[in-house]
Every structure is written in C-alpha cells, then in structure tokens.
Image (cartoon, rainbow, N blue to C red):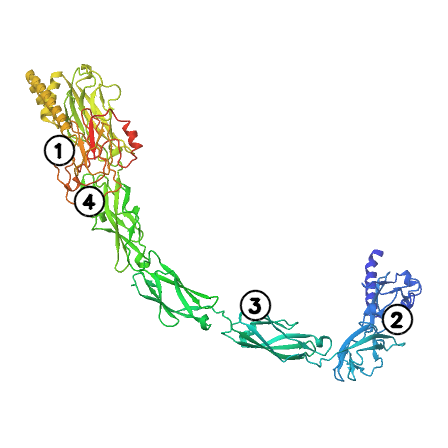
Amino acid sequence: MGVCWGPVVRVLVLQAAWALGGGQVRYSVAEEGKAGTVVGRLAPDLGLEAGEAEARGLRLVAQGRRASVEVSGASGALVVSSRLDREELCGKSAPCALRLEVLLERPLRVFHVELEVTDINDNAPLFPAARKNLSIPENSPAGSRFPLEGASDADVGANAQLSYTLSPSEHFSLDLHRSEEYRESLFLVLTKALDRETLPVHRLVLTASDGGRPSLTGTMELVISVLDANDNAPQFNQSVYKVQLPENAAEGTLVVRVNATDPDEGSNCEITFALIKTFPPKALNLFILKPKTGEIRLAGALDFEEVRSYEIEIEARDKGTPPLSGHCKVVVEVLDVNDNAPEVWVTSLSVPVAEDASVGTVVALLSVRDRDSGANGRVRCALWPAAPFGLVATLSGSYSLVLREALDRERVSEYEVEVRAEDGGAPALRGRLAVRVPVSDVNDNAPAFAQAVYTVLARENNAAGAELARVWARDPDEAGNGRVRYSVWEGGAGGAWAVGGWRSGAASSYVSVDAESGRVWALRALDYEEVQVVQFEVRAVDAGEPPLCGNATVQLFVVDENDNAPALLPGAGGVGGGGASGWSGPESGALWAWAAWGAPAGQVVAKIRAVDADSGYNAWLRYELWEPRGKGPFRVGLYSGEVSTARALEEADGPRQRLVIVVRDHGEPSRSATATLSVSLVEGAEAALAAAGSSWSGPGLRAAAGAEGVAGASSSWTNVWLVVAICAVSSVFMVAVVLYGAWRWAPRAGVLSGPGPATLVCASEVGSWSYSQRQSRSLCVADGAGKSDLMVFSPNLPPPPGPAAKETQPEPPALLDTVSGPPSLASRPFPLLALTYHPTPGQALFGAGLLPRGVRAVGAWQVLKDVTGTFASALATLPEPRAVCVGED
C-alpha cells in the first residue's frame, strides 16, 4: 500500500510547490542594520504554524553572493546576520533589491523572497584630491572660466545630491550646471582681472554638501598661481652690427656676438637667438648662430671674388606665451686675399685619337683662368709628361693640346696627361687638369701564331670529325681588327707526304679548321700505310679593313696501328744449299722444298718470307712452327723464318714432311698468317741437283720444273760438280764486289742532299738509329738484299722545296732503289731517322733517308716512341749484329 501511494504523494507535493512558487514575499530593510534585526516574520508569511518551520527545515538557499540575512530556526523569522552595506551590494543602483530563495523540506517546497535594502546618508562627498593647483595668466580677461572636477557621493537619491560653495574672494566665483542628460559641470569663474605684482597666489576652499539629513560635506583647497604676462619684447643693444673678415678666415672663426635683454621675468625673459635669413640666400649655411649665447661663427669658406659682403638678419625670441621677439642685422664685409688657384678646363676634346694620326693633330682645346687680379692672376702652363703631346698657346687664356709624336695603340692604348697651371702670387698657387686621351685602333698588325710550326700526332683509323689539334693566333689589334678567323690555305704546303713519296692533292681533303676556335678536325679516317705525314698551312685572317693575315705550318704525323696482317712473299731465296724451295700460289700459301737424307742438324732447307704493311713493332715478325708439334726433324728461326734441320735426317723420317708455319707480328692485338711447307726427302745428289736447278731457275720455281732438273741431274754427275764449281766462283765474285763497294762508297754512299762530310754511325743486324738536323746522309751496305725498316721523327718539317737535285753517285744494287722515289723528295732537307732491320744470316741491314712507295718498316722500332726507353729495350732482344754502317751528316 505504501509502495503504491509514494509516487502519488510526490506528484501532489510538487504541484503544490509550483502553485506556491507563483507568489512572492517582499521585505524592506535599511542598510547598516545591526545583526539580529528582524527583517520579517517569514514562517507565518509562508503559512507555517509556530514550530513547524524548524521541524520542516525552513532555510535560505545561497545565491552566490553574501545576502547578510538568514532564517531563524526557532521563530522562522528573516533576520540580519551581518553588516548590510547598500553601496557594497548594489553600488549606485536604485532601488537595491535582493532576490532570495527559501527552501522548505518535508515536503519539498521553494519560496521566492525579495529583500529591498534602503539607503541612508552614510557617505560624505569626496573630491579627487585634497588640493588643486591652478595657474592663471595675469592678463586673463574677466569672465574667464576654468573647469573644476566636482566631488562624488557613494549614496543615492537625495543623499547624493551635492551643492558647492567657495570661500569668499573678489576675483573668483563658482558656476554649477546641472542637466538630466549629462553630469553636472563645475567651473571657476574669474570675476575680476588679476594682477600678479599685487597678489601672485590666491588660496580658496571649495566645499561640497549632500542632501542627506544630517548633511555631510567634503572640501578641497584651490591654490591659484597668477602667471606673469609676456608684455615686453627682447631688445638688442645695436640694431646693426658691422664686421670685417678676410676671405681666408678659417672655419669656426667668431664673426660677432649679439646681445638682447627682456624686462620680463621667468620664461618671459629667457631669450633664444635664431638666424632668420641671409643675403645672398646661399650664405644661410655659411654661418652658425648659437641660440643661447648669440655667437655667430664661420661655417664655410669665404670667397671675395664670389661674394664681397653678407647681410644676416637675427631674431631674439623670449619664451613667453605668446612669445615676443626683437630683430637686428649683421653686415659681414669680406676682405680680399690671394686664395684662388688657376683653373684649367677642357673646351673641346676630340677623342679617341687614331693611332695613325699625323703629328700636329689637335687633340683638345683648353682654357685657363685665375680669378685673382694683378700678379696673382697671371698664369703659366706646362704639360706632363711632355711626350707624345704638347701645349701650344693660341689666345689669352687658351691653349691647344697637339700630337708631337707618332702613336702605337698596341704599345700604349691610353694616355693620361696632366696640364699644370701656376699663377704669379707669393706663394704661388697651382692648378691641375688630367686629360685622358684614348687611342683608337687601326688594322696595322697581322695575326701571329703562337708557333710557326705545329707538330701533331694522330693515330691512323681515327674517326672522321675527331679533333686533332688546336692552333691559336694573336692579333694585338682590338674589336674587328683583332677578331681572327682560321682556314686551311690551299696556296701553301697543302698536301700529304708519305714515306713512299709525295702525294698530290689538297690538305682540305684530310683536315678542316674551325674558323672561330682554330680547332683542327679530321675529315676522314687516316691510313698510315697511305699517308704518314700531312703537312698544310693554316691561315689566320683578321676582320680589319683591309684584312691582314698570318700563316702557320701544321705537320700531322700519322701514328701506325696494327691493322694489317703479315703477307707471305712469293719465291724462296736465301736457301743455304741444303735444298730447294718453291711457291705454289699466293692464295693457298703452300710452299715446297727438297732436303737430302743424312743432312746434318742446322742445315737450312727453306726460308719463309713475309712482309707486314704496318711499321715498327706492328711489322716486326716472328715465325713459329705450328705443325708438327713436339720433337720433329725441322725447326724455324724465330725472326729469320729459315727452316732448318733440327737433327740429322734419316730414312725413318719418311719421304715427305708437311710443316705448318705461323707468321705473327708484335702488334696489339697480334695478327698472323699461315704458310704450309712440304719438304721432300731425297738422296744427296738429287738434292744438290735440285739446288742447282733452283739457282738457275730463280725464285718461283714450280714443282714440275724442279722434277725435270732432278731427272737431268741423275743422268750425269759431271754436271753436278760443274754446277758446284760455278756456284763457288760466283760466290767469291759476289763477295769481292761487296767488299769493293763497301770500300768505294763508305765515305759518301747514296748522297741524298747537298755535299758535306759524312759522319758514320755503325749499325748491326738488330738495327741502328741516328737523328740530326743536318741535310746530307750517306749509306753503306753489305751483300744481300734485305727488307728495310724506315723510322721517321721530324718535329719541325719545312715546306716542300723546289726542284730536286740530281743524284751524282752510283747506287749499289743492294739499295733496292731506296732513293728512286720522286725527285722532289730525293734532296729534301728533312731531318729524318731511317733504319732497316733484317735478322736473316747473310743478309745485311741498310738505311736511307727516304724509302720508296711500297717498302714498309719491319723491325723492333716504332716511329714515334721514346728512343731512350722502348728503342733501347728492343735492341737488347735482337740477334747478333751484322756489319752495316749508316752515315749521317
């Protein structure tokens, strides 16, 4: 039953509380009431019985600020609990109403109570300051109003209504303005003019009273100081000051001190001086006036010739309000002294001057002036330096600057001359003027190359368009006169020079020159086997009028590359008598030879001949026995190509031996060729007959011809011995001829150029080298024909000469027509190094200045390698030397 009625009772209580909350209880209490003062009987007013308030928990709910009242628990009355200060609670708000909430528990009810705190006159009027200082000029007119700040009262209503009174005074009164829209305004009114000399200070009391009962008051003392009126202007002791100054007076010199007085007092008699204006006006910055002392000092230089007198107007101003001022004039007379140096200036200047200008050309017109007079104004002029210009006097005070020597812009491009002027004063004054005379360029210098001859190395097979070198020519002229363009000059030594002779044709087919930079480009790939040296001239032409040009020779040496494999030569010569050999054709590379059974070890049965179109190491050949491998009956000379017996031949070796010989060069990478040699083993008589038949038939004997010779030889041993005798006699004869030739032509063999003593340089089978700048060479050789190895090193080749000199000395047949090339090269004074190398026993090394077309270098040297390094190391690897001499002068 209790559980069911509980919610219903709560709803009824809340509805009753809401109905009661619609009403409000109001009380009123005066501020400053004592604690315990009953404000109102709250419990009965709320309809509570006696004692019910405490039982039901009647209490006041806090509202966030102290209410200074509380509910008495016993009586249920609303009483004052602490000091009530309306100004603290509400400030200037009126009325001051406090809204309170009273809570009644069991059941819960809320009541609203409004408490009005009424004001009492408990605050006196209060001024912002106890004393107010005022300053009023003595010349203030009557009726002048001076605002005053009124007092304030914290109370409200009638308790805050203020009235003001002023202590008695014949000079002042009060004026109060009230308005409903604005605050009241209080003024102090001057009713009678003041006299500072009679009463300098007035002391008054201002009293404010409120409208309470009893009335409360507040006071403020007014201290009024009478200010002196500025009724006297400053007075100078002189109206005009006259001063004399020399024009050379130093800066800071005291000109004059002015003085003024003011009978007023205080700030009205404090005077400051100011410079108002000057005549002429530009002198305003020439003088400095100290504002407090009145001193005038010189701030710049005086010039009698420019201004002879100055007028300065000075103002003296006091500090009164308003300030008053007085004026005076200072007249400064300038006294003349000799302080002007001569002046030199250019009237007309004709620059730049062409470097080919003729002597006497007028460069400039000068004017000279001295503003002084008399001796101080007479001027003498001189020029420094004296060359290449001079001064010529024309009219009074005028001079001409003329050219007296020829100019050269490349030596001096600009002159700076100084004209010095001196007057006749004591001491003399001097003036100077610097005149800058630039020299303009004319095209009087041809381009000059840094080198007369450029030596360039280029590897063969270079790419077309590759940069080979760069030439540079300097033209000391400027602008277009010094702008150089390059080209290959076809009218010069354009062409290609090969080892085998001179190749006709323009150098422009091999190289081109960039017109702007001078870079030399290859137009096509170079082939050492075709051209070893390309010599041409580069012409540099400037852009002047008329254009000038200069030439330089470029020697382009082509450096060999290993781009050719060895090639087998037809024929079989140089066999040492032990057999015969033959050639079956250049395509197959097959050779055949005869060898006798029982031939001792070391007997040469054949010789493999090969040639490499390259030069130097790339053409130095070595021979290797490729088949059969192991210990066979034959061996091959490493560098000679001679096929000899490795041991005595036996019948067990069979009737025929097939040898495969590989010929390799020393290039990187190495190239090779293969030769197949068939050696037929026969009886000794047949071998001798085959050898004789080979000697009669010469190189290139076919197999069929050899067979017929052998058949004929077998029919008659007499013929065999006859052949042997003939060969012996022929050999002795050839040795005699070679020895005679060596004795006959040793001093001057193979003269290639003009006469001169020969200097012999002995060489060996491994080679010899020599280099000289002289122009004649000689050669001596031993018997036998060898393959030559030409080495050329020429860093400074001259242009091709004219017609060649004719040979007057007989040439030995062993020269292989070494100097039989074009006549134009036979007598060229080329400083060349020519070497030959052939390691075959019985063969001779020979050398010459030039070799014909088709003869290539074979040996251990390369054209442009270091002769002190690679060359020397190569010589040490070669076989025993042979007797050969190379002469060079």
Nearest the eye: 310 or 709: 310
Expressed as whole percent of the image width and height from the top left, the position of residue 805 reads 14, 41
The image quadrant of residue 609 is: top left
- Given the image, on which type of amino acid does mark 2 rest? Val
Q: Earlier in the sequence, mark 2 or mark 1?
A: 2
Work out how far the residue at label 4 is from the one at label 3, CA to CA, in angstroms.
Answer: 85 Å
- How many C-alpha atoms fall within 10 Å of the one at disc 1: few (<14), some, or many (≥20)? many
Q: Nearer the viewer, mark 1 or mark 3?
A: 3
Quarter of the rendering containing residue 245: bottom right
Query: Which residue is labeled 2 in the image?
Result: 29
Between residue 455 and residue 287, name the one nearer to us. Answer: 287
Q: Name the one closer to the observer, 77 or 598.
A: 598
Number of the label disc, if any, that sits on residue 251:
3
Separation of residues labelled 4 and 1 (CA atoms):
25 Å
Query: Type of residue at label 3?
Result: Glu
Say the numbered circle drawn on residue 811.
1
Q: Is residue 221 above or below residue 635?
A: below
Looking at marks 4 and 1 on the same chain, the residue that comes earlier in the sequence is marked by: 4
Between circles 2 and 1, the one closer to the viewer is: 1
Whole-angstrom CA distance, mark 2 to mark 1, is 162 Å
Q: For numbered disc 1, what is the local secondary structure?
A: loop
User: Could you tell me which residue is drawn at 40 percent across and 66 percent down?
Assistant: 381
Where is residue 483? Give x, y as percent: 31, 56
User: Crowding at label 4, few (<14), some or many (≥20) Cα neighbours within 10 Å?
Assistant: some
* Residue indicated by mark 4: 800
Q: Position of residue 809 (x, y in %)?
A: 12, 34
Q: Earlier in the sequence, mark 2 or mark 3?
A: 2
